[in-house]
Amino acid sequence: MTHLDILLTTPLLVLGIGSLFLLMLGAFSNNARLTGIGAAVVILAAMVQPLLQPVSGPVFAIDGGAGGHLMQVSPFTNIATLILLGIALLCLPLIENYFKAAKAYKPEVYVLVVLALAGMVALITSAHLLTLYVALELMSFPIYILTAFLRDDAKSSEAGLKYYVLGSMASGLMLYGISLIYAGLGTLSFTGVFTALNNAAATGEAAPMLLVGTTLILVASLFKLSVAPFHMWTPDVYEGAPTPVTAIMGSLPKIAAVALLIRLLAGPFDSLEGYWQPALGWLAIASMLVGASLAIVQTNLKRLLAFSTIANIGFIMVGIVAANPQGASGALLYLGIYAFTTLGLFAALMASGAQTVNDLKGLATRNKGLAATFLLLLFSLAGIPPLAGFMAKFAVFTAAVQAGLVPLAIAGVLSSVLALFYSLWLIKVMVFDTPDTLTPTPKIPQGLNIVMFVSCIATLILGIFPNMLGNLTLAAATAIF
Amino acid sequence: MFYTLTLSHVLTLSALLFTMGMAGIVLNRRNIIAILMCLELVLLSVSINLVGTSYFRADITGQIFSMFILTVAAAELAIGLAIVTLFFRNRGTIEIDAADLMKG
């Protein structure tokens, strides 16, 4: 390893060291706003290296001696890291106003976010089951704490408790899966597992122990993604967590977990495709239908968005299950578009101050701009052309049909119809229902305005020119297949 | 009469402990502290698996992994206890059934 190679891991190093720096900054200045600006600088600094050569960079692995490679940097991880950090920048403005109003605006919030980001970047680049485990925990722990951050709010601590117990259970399952793979194959690096599983598959059936191990590892990643039927925690945790944390939870860890899942399935578990493709396909169908149909009956807006997340993750799973470069590229594209659309929706939710669907009654008469934002983002999420959400759905469906998975595409279209139903219902409530009060909504803080503006502009631009992001994700996905 | 210890003995012990831990988490309806203990049991069963395999396969990776698990488990438990403390402060109980503010 030369000094030039270590440069490729700068995103992780910058985020890791930056979080410690932010901790000191926060402790000595006790100025949350300053720490927030520091966090933005750290995230921007972490983006420099992947921006320099996003798709032309080398595939490079950090050697772990006899144990095999520990981390791998490739065009795929570069693009995933860029999407992740870009979305993370968009998350930061949501934090300030909410926590100020809750009288809990402390520097720690930003430190925890940057720490979680370090875990996510490590997760995206991990090439060894040990790195994967440590990165997954580094990603999860700060989010447990953020969920329970409102100390005097019973709902927040209950959500934290539920997320913690179920999350730790999932990581326990994954660890057991890893230990079974180790017992069966004697190696833990992705390349080692790939070769050993290929040999095992060539000599006959894969041993049950290896299948159980693989299943447990995949289940843990699906849990983080809240794919049905591992979605039980999602609505409760989304409802109880502070709204900006819900927005973070709904976007950032999903990006990291999807990138990891694509790499796991294209890498070490590639030879087991005959086993996981049908299973994950069914889960994708279940996710799309369960999420979209249960979203209809929700009255709490955060729960509604939680079920919408579950449905959207189902669509992303369609791209992953297709197991071809187009599918992986579609999944990444969908993920990027979904993440900023959701962030925009959460910003609009916070700006309107609404908790339940009824609070949105007649929003169009009270604040036209806000209602228009809702309309645009909800239509994009439901997949109306020419908005970005349509292009994302189009990309994953095309990949599924190319891979011969027509039932998945049909379930996807059904789910889109259901999603359109609740989007239209929300819009009907906002535009046609008589409001309970005619007072205009309070002045919208600058930070929320920026997030909503960026989100709407990106929705429009990527809807008309999806290849701006699509070409990058396709180049990234081609690199790993 | 002597038996030789083999890898399958280690794997069986670990599988038993793992099942006990998971069953404890799922079946426990009363105390959150007991759930934290079951989580520890799960992590330690995995450590047994890794160290056992490491010994029988003469490969050091498993032992290093178990060191990482111990470290992460300590951090995990610290966060868990902190969250349980918060929950107790807000609700005055640490019974599982008290975590029922959100349903649906």
Image (cartoon, coloured by chain):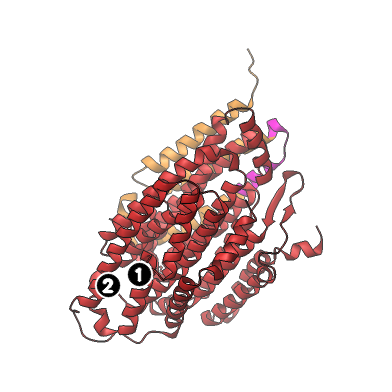
The residue lying at 45 percent from left, 41 percent from top is A279
- Judging by the rendered image, the residue that carries numbered circle 2 is A427
Residue A282 higher or lower than B2, as above or below: below
The residue lying at 74 percent from left, 50 percent from top is A64
Answer whether residue B89 is visible to the viewer in this image: no
The picture's colour for chain B is orange
Instruction: Work out whether residue A459 or residue A291 is closer to the camera in this orientation and state it.
Output: A459
Q: Amino acid at mark 1?
A: Leu
Instruction: Work out whether residue A239 or residue A340 is closer to the camera in this orientation and state it.
Output: A340
Residue A422 higher or lower than A286, as above or below: below
- In percent of width and height, residue A209 lies at 55, 32
- In percent of width and height, residue B45 lies at 55, 38
The residue lying at 65 percent from left, 43 percent from top is A188
Q: Is residue B68 magenta?
A: yes
Q: Which chain is red?
A: A
The magenta segment = B55-69
